[in-house]
Image (cartoon, helix red, strand yellow):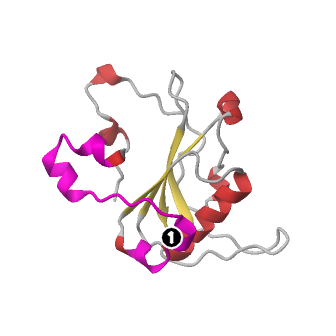
Amino acid sequence: MAAALVAADPDLSSRMTFHTADIMDVTCALKDYDVVFLAALVGMDKEDKVKVVDHLAKYMSPGATLMLRSAHGARAFLYPVLDPRDLRGFEVLSVYHPTDEVINSVIIARKLPVPCVQPLDGLGAYVLPSKCACAEIHAFNPLNKMNLVEEFALEE
């Protein structure tokens, strides 16, 4: 389905590849991708989804981007919710919670270049992101001549 969405744009479709697999079976191949998209329905509950994120943190290349779908507020009844704090090993760059008929929130994170120390029983060190727009709600107005890609542009 994702490939069909970009098929109308030859330039874009020539630069994108799509694979469907059990992500827990994909290991070293994850290092070949600059961006990994994680659908809202990955994992039947929050614990399963966190396991997938931990797996991605272990195998994605440092600096690669993770774009994942989640939910917020009452929309959490439909999908497992991931909190930005659940993204161990990633720097959360932006969180977008829609305020219209769109159901899924979007979280954009970057794989940290250093390993994240996992706390033991809530004690231990964390690698904290340098900046986070986690608490902000970003409104997307399609009339302001800014497309969604520009809205989520990453600053280097």
Q: Quadrant of the N terminus?
A: top left
Give x and y (percent) for residue 59.
50, 75
2 vs 78, left or right, is left
Amino acid type, label 1: Leu
Q: Residue at x 76, y 73 (%)?
A: 119
15 vs 57, left or right, is left
Give x and y (percent) for residue 6.
25, 44
Between residue 46 and residue 144, name the one nearer to us: 46
Q: Residue at x 69, y 58 (%)?
A: 48
Figure quadrant of residue 150:
top left
Figure quadrant of residue 25:
bottom right
Which residue carries the number 1 mark? 112
Between residue 151 and residue 1, name the one nearer to us: 1
Using the image, determine if residue 128 lies above or below residue 133: below
SS assignment at label 1: loop
Figure quadrant of residue 152:
top left
Using the image, determine if residue 52 lies above or below residue 40: below
State which region is magenta.
3-31
Using the image, determine if residue 113 lies above or below residue 77: below
Residue 20 on the magenta segment: yes
Q: Quadrant of the C terminus?
A: bottom left
The answer to whether any part of residue 130 appears in the image is no
Q: How many marks?
A: 1
